[in-house]
Image: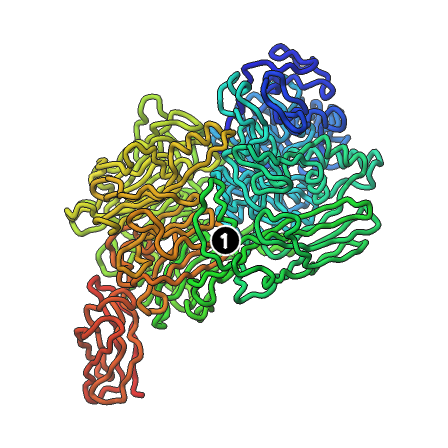
C-alpha cells in the first residue's frame, strides 16, 4: 500500500539551503543540497540527524543512508543506468508528471533523431550525440522540445514520452529487438507500446518512480535517490496485482531494454515456472531485481521474499513517524525501527530508511540505492579505480559488507547482532559502499541455486539435501569457500556446521555439498507444532534450517548468501505427502472420485496451467492426467524460457454436467479462458474453450483521462461455479470475468437464455460528495441462493463498483451486491447498497483493498429463504435478506472488526448454525498503520457468530497466526467426536483447528512451510470413515493430513466455497454416491457388492439403479445398509451382465459399474 510523503512543517537547518524560497538555479547540487521543497523531510537520505530531532540518536549519527554524502563525494547517478519500474502504469495526467517527464528512458533504436525545426529529415540510428540535441549528456524528451513532428497529444501541458509514442509509432520493429515501437516502455496488460494508465486518479506508480529517480534540484517536489538515472515504465496490470505471464514478460522486457535494475512493486497472482525462469535469466544477465514483499506485517513469502536472487523491499522508519510534525521530531529517538507495514523473515536482506515504511516505498528505495551504486561502479571503472564495472552480485555484496547493523534489542521490533529476521543485514550506507568501491574493496560473490527457498524435508524419508550454487572472486587471484548449515532461523556462529568447502581461481557452478539431516536432533524436527506467543510469530521458523555459502578472497574479503529450508516430520501426514508439485499452488483442491476407483482423487490447477488429478493413495497422477490449458501467448519468445500454459490460480469446479454419473473438471485461467475436461483428462468434445472477452477494450493511445476507472478486459480470478439453473437436471457453468460479464452456459457450451448479464451496468446515483469507482472487473465468484424460497435458484455476485469520497483511505464507502434470476433478469431489491467502514482506492492492490469478500448463502432462520453474507473492504461482514435489505452486521460488541481480504463460511458450530470468518483486529490495524514506527503488530483473529442473531460465540474472536489472505474457514470434525471444528490456514505456516470454545483442537495447529491462499479441503480420501485435510501452498507443496474426524460429520462446509462445485451455498448436496466396490457374481441368481454412501463413501444411498443385459431392463433396488456394508441384489435368469449405479436423495448419480460373471 502507498503512503503519501509527509510534508515538512519545520525547517531543517541544511547548509546552503534556504527552504521555501529557493529557485531552481539557486543550489549548486550536489555539493549543496537540492532546492526541491520536500527535500528537508527526506531524512532517509541524510548523513546527519537534523537538529529538530532533539532526542534522536543513531550509531552512525545519521537519520538516513548517507546518500547526500555519496552524491557530494562520488555520484548522483548516470543516464546509462536505467531503473525499470514494473507496476500499474505511469500517469501522465497527474500533477507530478513534471517530475518524471525528463527522467523517463527513451529507446533511440525506435526513434528518429530529434529535430530542432522544419524541415525535419526522419533519420533512424546513430550515436548518442546524434540524439542528445541539447547536449546535456542525456537523451530524453527534452531533446524533442522544439521538434515540429511532436505535439502535446495527451493534452497534459507537457511534452512527454507518450507524445513521442503517438508521434513515432510506425508498426515497425526498427531496432529488431522483438518489440514493435517500444519507444518508452511497454504495457503487457493490454500488449501495447504505451505503459501509461487510463486511470488518472491512480498515482501510486508515479509516487514510487519518483522515490527512485525523480527529477532533482528543479524546485519541485522532492528528490530521487538516483537523480541522474533514468526510469523505464513497464505496465504489468491495472495496478500492482498482476498475472504471472504478464509479470514474467515485463521482467524480461526490462532486461531486454538494458535496465540495470528492475523495481517490481507488484503482488504476484501466482508463482509460475515462467516467472522463475525469467528471474534466473535476469540474474544471469547481470540485472539487480527488487520486488515488493508485503504490507501486512507478517512472514508471508510474497515476491521479493520468495524468488531467488531477488531483493525484497523492506523498510525502517523513525519511531515517532505518524505523529504530526513537530510532534514526530520531538518523539523520535531512533530512525531504525522496522516499519509495522513491511514483512520480516529469513529472506530479509536490507532495511532501507524510508519516510512512510510501506513496501511500496521501500522497494524503489532499495532499487534506487542499487542503481546509484551500480552507476558509481561504472564511474570507478572509467576512472580506473577498478578493472570493470560492478556486477549485480558484487553490488549486493558491497551493500551487505558496508551496511550498518541494526542490533538494538530495545527497539519495538528488537534487533540482534549480525544478520537477523527483522532487519536482515541492516541499513545500507551508500557513502561507505561507494567508498569501498573506490578503494577496490569489493567482496567475492557466491549464491545458492538449490534447494529452493522454504523447501520442506522429512528427515524420516530424506537423509541428505544436495546444495548447488555458484562461487567466484573475479577481482582476486584465488578464493576459498565454505558451505555451512545450522538449525534455526538466526543461529549463532558456533552452531554452523561445514557441509562442503573448496578453493579455486575461476568461477565455479555446480555442487557445493550436501546437508546431512541425520545431524539434526529429532527434538528439533519432531517436536509438536505450537502457535506463536510473540508478535514476531516465532513458530513460523520452528523447523527452519539455515544454509549459507561463504566465499573469501585472497585479501580476506568475504561474500555470503543465505537460504533456508524447513526440516520436519508430522506423524499425521498421509504417507507420500507433502508432495512437491514444483510451481505455485494458489488454488485449493476438489476431492472427488473422478474415475470410479473407490477413493477420492485430489484435483486442482496450478500456476503453470497444468490440471492435476492425484491418486490420494499412491500420490501418482491418475491415468490421462495431468493435462494443460492452451500455451501462453507471449509478445516475444526467449531462448531457454518456456512460457508454459495459461495459468490457473482459482479453484477448479468438478461436477456431473450431463447428469449421467460421469464427472467433468472445469477450470478458468487468469488469461480469461474456461476449459472443460473429461474424467480421463481429454477435453470435452462438445465444449470449445470460452474466451471471456465480450466487450473487452484495448485503450487508445494516448490514454484517455478516465479517473476511477478500470475498463473491461479479458481475464479472470473468479472460480467457475456449477449449478442446475434451469431445472433440467444438468449443471450449468457460471463464470465471472474481468470484462464485467457474468456468464451461464449449458454443458454443450451454448448460452443459457438471458445470459451473459452485464453486471454493474445499472446507473447508480452516487451520493453527494462521492465518486463512483467504475471498475468493470468481476474479481470474485458468485454464490447460488434461493432468495425468495420458490425453489428456483438465483445468482448473487459482488461487483467492484463502489462509491468513495476520493483516492486513498476513505470512510463510509458504498458497495453493492447484484442478484439475478435463472433467466438473467435482476432480482427485485438488487443491486443493493451497503456501507463498508473504509475502502482504500489507489493502494495498488485494487480489489484487495476495495473489497474481495466472496458472497455466500444460507437459510439462517429456517424460513425457506436464503440470506447472503458478504464483507466490505475494511470492516465487518453483513447479512442481507432475500430482498437485498440489511438484516444484521457480524461484529462483536466493542470490537473494531475488519474482514480484510477474507471470506466466511456457514455451518453448525457450537449452539446451532454459525457464521465464521477470519480477519484482522481493526484497532490493531489502525494503531499499526497510523504509527508505523511504534513496533505495534497487526493482530489477526478468527471470528464466529450465531448466524441468525449475530452474537459472537464464546471464546471468539480467537487468535489467528498470520493473515488468511483470500481465505475462508472450513467447518468439519477433525477430532472424532462428531462435532465440527473451524479450520483455517494463512500466510504464516500455521493450520489452525478451533474448537467451539476458541481453543486449538487436539493435534492442532499443524505446520506447513509458508503461505496458503484459500482453505484446506476436507474429505475421506481412502473411504475409511475418517476425514483428511488437503491443502496446497504457494511454495508448491500438496499437503495431506490424517485426522480422526468422522467423515459422517463432514457435511457442513468442507471446501472454501462450500463444495467442489463452488456454489457458496450452505446445505447444497453436491457429492454423489460412490461406485459400488468389490462386486461378486458367479453367474447365479444373486450378486453382492460393498455399498457406497450417500456422499461418496459415507452415509446411505437412496436407491440402486440396476440394468440387466441382454434384456436392458432396469429396476430400482432399496439399499439394505450404509456405506461399507454388503448389499445383495437378485439377478434374473439369462443375465449376461448388469450395471449398478447409486443415486442419492438429491438425485446425484454415481458412476455406473458393470459386473460380469467371475
In depth, the one of 873 and 483 nearer the eye is 483
Q: How is the image coloured?
A: rainbow
Q: Residues within 10 Å of mark 1 (few under 14, many from 20)?
A: many
Residue picked out by circle 1:
1009
Residue at horizontal 30 percent and vertical 44 percent from the top = 955
Q: Is residue 561 visible?
A: yes
The image quarter in which residue 765 lies: top left
Residue at horizontal 42 percent and vertical 66 percent from the top = 682
Horizontally, residue 1097 falls left or right of residue 579, namely left
In depth, the one of 101 and 758 nearer the eye is 101
Would you place residue 132 above or below residue 730 in this image?
Answer: above
Residue at horizontal 31 percent and vertical 63 percent from the top = 656
The image quarter in which residue 512 lies: bottom right
Would you place residue 29 above or below residue 816 in this image?
Answer: above
Horizontally, residue 634 falls left or right of residue 132, namely left
Q: Is residue 648 visible?
A: no
Q: Tell me the element at label 1.
A: loop
Amino acid at each position: 500500500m502507498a503512503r503519501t510523503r509527509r510534508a515538512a512543517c519545520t525547517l531543517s537547518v541544511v547548509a546552503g539551503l534556504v527552504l521555501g524560497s529557493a529557485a531552481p538555479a539557486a543550489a549548486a547540487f550536489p555539493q549543496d543540497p537540492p532546492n526541491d521543497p520536500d527535500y528537508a523531510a527526506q531524512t532517509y537520505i541524510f548523513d546527519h540527524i537534523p537538529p529538530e530531532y532533539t532526542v534522536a540518536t543513531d550509531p552512525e549519527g545519521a537519520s538516513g543512508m548517507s546518500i547526500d554524502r555519496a552524491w557530494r563525494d562520488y555520484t548522483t547517478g548516470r543516464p546509462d543506468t536505467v531503473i525499470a519500474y514494473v507496476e500499474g502504469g505511469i500517469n501522465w495526467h497527474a500533477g507530478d508528471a513534471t517530475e518524471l517527464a525528463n527522467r523517463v528512458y527513451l529507446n533511440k533504436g525506435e526513434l528518429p533523431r530529434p529535430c530542432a525545426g522544419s524541415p525535419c529529415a526522419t533519420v533512424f540510428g546513430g550515436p548518442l550525440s546524434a540524439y542528445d540535441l541539447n547536449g546535456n549528456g542525456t537523451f530524453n524528451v527534452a531533446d524533442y522540445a522544439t521538434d515540429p513532428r511532436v505535439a502535446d497529444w495527451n493534452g497534459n501541458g507537457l511534452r512527454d514520452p507518450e507524445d513521442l509514442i503517438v508521434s513515432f509509432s510506425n508498426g515497425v520493429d526498427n531496432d529488431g529487438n522483438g518489440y514493435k515501437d517500444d519507444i518508452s516502455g511497454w504495457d503487457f496488460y493490454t500488449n501495447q507500446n504505451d505503459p501509461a494508465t487510463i486511470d488518472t486518479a491512480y498515482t501510486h506508480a508515479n509516487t514510487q518512480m519518483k522515490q527512485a529517480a525523480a527529477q532533482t534540484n528543479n524546485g519541485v517536489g522532492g528528490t530521487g535517490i538516483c537523480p541522474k538515472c533514468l526510469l523505464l515504465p513497464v505496465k504489468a496490470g491495472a495496478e500492482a496485482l498482476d498475472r504471472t505471464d504478464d509479470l514474467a514478460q515485463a521482467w524480461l522486457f526490462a532486461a531486454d531494454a538494458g535496465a540495470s535494475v528492475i523495481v517490481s512493486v507488484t503482488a504476484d497472482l501466482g508463482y509460475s515456472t515462467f516467472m522463475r525462469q525469467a528471474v534466473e535469466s535476469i540474474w544471469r544477465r547481470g540485472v539487480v531485481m527488487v520486488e515488493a514483499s508485503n504490507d501486512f506485517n507478517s512472514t508471508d513469502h510474497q515476491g521479493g521474499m520468495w524468488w531467488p536472487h531477488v531483493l525484497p523491499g523492506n523498510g525502517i522508519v523513525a519511531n515517532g513517524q505518524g505523529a504530526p510534525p513537530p510532534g514526530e521530531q520531538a518523539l523520535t529517538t531512533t530512525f531504525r525501527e522496522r516499519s509495522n507495514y513491511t514483512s520480516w523473515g529469513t529472506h530479509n536482506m536490507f532495511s532501507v530508511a524510508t519516510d512512510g515504511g510501506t513496501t511500496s516505498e521501500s522497494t524503489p528505495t532499495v532499487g534506487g540505492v542499487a542503481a546509484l551504486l551500480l552507476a558509481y561502479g561504472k564511474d570507478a571503472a572509467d576512472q580506473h579505480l577498478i578493472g570493470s564495472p560492478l556486477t549485480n552480485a558484487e553490488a549486493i555484496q558491497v551493500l551487505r559488507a558496508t551496511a550498518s547493523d541494526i542490533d538494538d534489542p530495545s527497539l519495538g521490533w528488537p534487533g540482534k547482532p549480525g544478520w537477523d529476521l527483522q532487519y536482515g543485514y541492516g541499513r545500507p550506507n551508500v557513502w561507505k559502499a561507494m567508498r569501498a568501491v573506490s578503494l577496490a574493496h569489493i567482496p567475492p560473490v557466491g549464491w545458492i541455486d538449490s534447494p529452493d527457498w522454504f523447501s520442506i524435508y522429512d528427515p524420516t524419508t530424506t537423509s541428505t539435501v544436495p546444495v548447488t550454487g555458484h562461487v567466484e572472486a573475479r577481482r582476486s587471484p584465488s578464493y576459498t569457500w565454505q558451505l555451512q548449515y545450522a538449525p534455526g532461523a538466526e543461529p549463532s556462529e558456533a552452531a554452523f556446521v561445514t557441509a562442503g568447502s573448496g578453493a579455486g581461481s575461476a568461477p565455479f557452478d555446480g555442487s557445493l555439498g550436501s546437508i546431512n539431516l541425520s545431524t539434526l536432533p529429532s527434538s528439533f524436527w519432531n517436536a509438536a507444532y505450537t502457535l506463536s506467543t510473540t508478535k514476531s510469530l516465532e513458530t513460523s521458523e520452528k523447523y527452519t534450517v539455515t544454509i549459507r555459502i561463504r566465499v573469501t578472497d585472497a585479501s580476506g574479503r568475504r561474500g555470503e548468501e543465505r537460504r533456508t529450508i524447513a526440516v520436519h516430520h508430522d506423524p499425521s501426514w498421509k504417507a507420500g505427502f507433502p508432495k512437491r508439485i514444483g510451481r505455485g499452488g494458489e488454488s485449493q483442491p476438489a476431492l472427488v472420485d473422478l474415475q470410479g476407483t473407490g477413493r477420492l482423487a485430489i484435483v486442482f490447477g496450478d500456476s503453470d496451467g497444468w490440471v492435476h488429478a492425484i491418486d490420494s493413495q499412491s500420490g501418482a497422477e491418475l491415468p490421462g492426467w495431468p493435462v494443460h490449458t492452451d500455451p501462453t501467448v507471449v509478445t516475444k519468445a526467449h531462448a531457454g524460457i518456456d512460457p508454459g500454459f495459461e495459468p490457473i490460480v482459482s479453484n477448479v469446479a468438478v461436477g456431473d454436467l450431463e447428469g449421467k454419473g460421469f464427472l467433468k473438471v472445469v477450470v478458468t485461467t487468469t488469461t480469461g479462458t474456461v476449459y472443460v475436461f473429461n474424467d480421463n483428462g481429454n477435453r470435452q468434445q462438445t465444449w470449445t474453450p470460452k474466451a471471456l472477452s465480450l466487450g473487452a477494450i484495448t485503450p487508445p493511445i494516448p490514454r484517455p483521462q478516465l479517473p476511477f476507472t478500470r475498463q473491461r478486459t479479458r481475464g479472470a480470478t473468479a472460480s467457475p461455479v456449477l449449478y442446475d439453473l434451469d431445472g433440467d437436471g444438468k449443471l450449468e457453468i457460471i463464470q465471472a470475468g474481468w470484462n464485467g460479464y457474468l456468464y451461464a452456459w449449458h454443458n454443450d457450451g451454448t448460452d443459457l437464455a438471458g445470459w451473459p448479464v452485464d453486471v454493474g451496468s445499472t446507473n447508480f446515483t452516487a451520493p453527494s460528495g462521492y465518486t463512483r469507482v467504475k471498475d468493470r472487473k468481476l474479481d470474485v465468484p458468485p454464490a447460488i441462493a434461493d432468495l425468495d424460497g420458490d425453489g428456483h435458484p438465483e445468482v448473487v455476485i459482488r461487483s467492484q463498483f463502489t462509491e468513495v469520497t476520493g483516492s486513498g483511505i476513505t470512510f463510509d464507502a458504498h458497495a453493492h451486491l447484484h442478484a439475478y434470476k435463472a433467466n438473467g433478469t435482476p432480482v427485485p431489491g438488487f443491486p443493493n447498497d451497503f456501507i463498508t467502514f473504509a475502502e482504500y482506492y489507489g493502494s495498488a492492490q485494487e480489489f484487495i483493498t476495495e473489497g474481495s469478500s466472496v458472497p455466500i448463502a444460507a437459510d439462517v432462520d429456517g424460513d425457506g429463504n436464503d440470506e447472503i453474507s458478504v464483507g466490505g473492504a475494511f470492516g465487518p461482514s453483513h447479512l442481507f435478506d432475500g430482498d437485498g435489505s440489511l438484516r444484521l452486521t457480524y461484529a462483536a460488541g466493542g470490537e473494531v472488526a475488519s474482514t480484510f481480504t477474507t471470506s466466511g463460511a456457514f455451518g453448525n458450530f457450537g449452539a446451532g448454525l454459525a457464521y465464521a470468518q477470519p480477519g484482522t483486529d481493526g484497532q490493531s490495524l489502525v494503531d499499526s498503520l497510523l504509527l508505523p514506527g511504534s513496533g505495534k503488530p497487526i493482530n489477526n483473529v478468527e471470528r464466529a457468530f450465531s448466524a441468525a442473531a449475530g452474537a459472537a460465540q464464546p471464546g471468539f474472536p480467537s487468535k489467528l497466526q498470520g493473515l488468511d489472505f483470500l481465505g475462508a474457514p472450513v467447518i468439519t470434525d477433525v477430532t472424532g467426536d462428531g462435532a465440527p471444528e473451524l479450520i483455517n490456514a494463512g500466510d504464516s505456516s500455521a493450520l489452525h483447528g478451533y474448537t467451539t470454545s476458541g481453543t486449538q483442537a487436539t493435534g492442532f495447529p499443524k505446520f506447513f512451510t509458508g503461505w496458503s491462499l484459500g482453505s484446506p479441503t476436507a474429505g475421506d480420501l481412502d473411504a475409511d470413515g475418517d476425514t483428511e485435510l488437503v491443502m496446497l501452498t504457494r511454495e508448491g507443496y500438496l499437503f495431506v493430513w490424517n485426522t480422526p474426524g468422522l467423515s459422517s460429520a463432514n457435511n457442513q462446509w468442507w471446501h472454501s466455497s462450500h463444495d467442489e462445485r463452488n456454489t457458496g451455498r450452505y446445505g447444497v448436496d453436491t457429492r454423489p454416491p460412490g461406485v459400488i466396490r468389490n462386486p461378486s457374481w458367479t453367474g447365479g441368481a444373486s450378486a453382492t457388492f460393498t455399498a457406497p454412501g450417500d456422499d461418496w463413501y459415507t452415509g446411505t444411498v437412496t436407491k440402486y439403479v440396476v440394468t440387466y443385459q441382454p434384456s436392458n431392463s432396469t429396476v430400482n433396488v432399496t439399499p439394505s445398509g450404509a456405506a461399507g456394508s454388503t448389499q445383495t441384489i437378485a439377478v434374473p435368469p439369462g443375465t449376461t451382465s448388469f450395471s449398478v449405479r447409486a443415486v442419492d436423495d438429491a438425485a446425484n448419480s454415481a458412476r455406473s459399474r458393470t459386473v460380469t460373471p467371475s
